[in-house]
Amino acid sequence: MKLRLCTNIALKTPIIIGENMKPEIIEALALELTKSKLANKDTTASDWVKTYEASLSEVKGECDKGRTRLKPATAGRLSSSN
């Protein structure tokens, strides 16, 4: 079965990665990133733990880039001067 890209889809709202991503999805992405980093290497359990923690931070960091920051009291967008 071949997959075909849908290039003619017009979105009314942009997709923001990480905006409402469930923690389980973030953890799964971190695990897959860990697996790819440690593929075909002789590793120990501590290597897996350290690499997973680093991968989790990377994924969370990427998700944070897409999040909209809101002011706590007014629920308005934060300006760059704050």
Image (cartoon, helix red, strand yellow):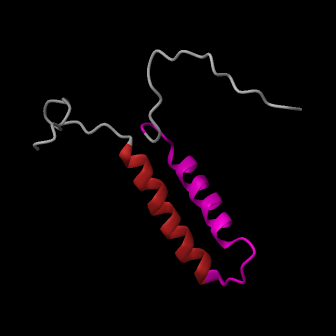
Q: Is residue 55 left or right of residue 3?
A: left
> What residue span does the magenta drawing correspond to?
19-45
Q: Position of residue 62 (x, y in %)?
A: 43, 51
Name the residue at 67% across, 64% down: 36
Q: Is residue 46 left or right of residue 20?
A: right
Q: Nearer the viewer, residue 26 or 12?
A: 12
Using the rendered view, name the quadrant where residue 38 is placed. Answer: bottom right
Name the residue at 46% across, 60% down: 58
Q: Quadrant of the N terminus?
A: top right
| Farthest-out residue, right | 1
Q: Is residue 81 above or below residue 48?
A: above
40 within the magenta span: yes
Q: Is residue 44 left or right of residue 23?
A: right
Q: Is residue 52 above or below residue 17?
A: below
| Farthest-out residue, front | 7
Using the rendered view, name the quadrant where residue 43 is placed. Answer: bottom right
| Farthest-out residue, left | 81
Q: Is residue 41 left or right of residue 81?
A: right
Q: Main secondary structure of the magenta part?
A: helix
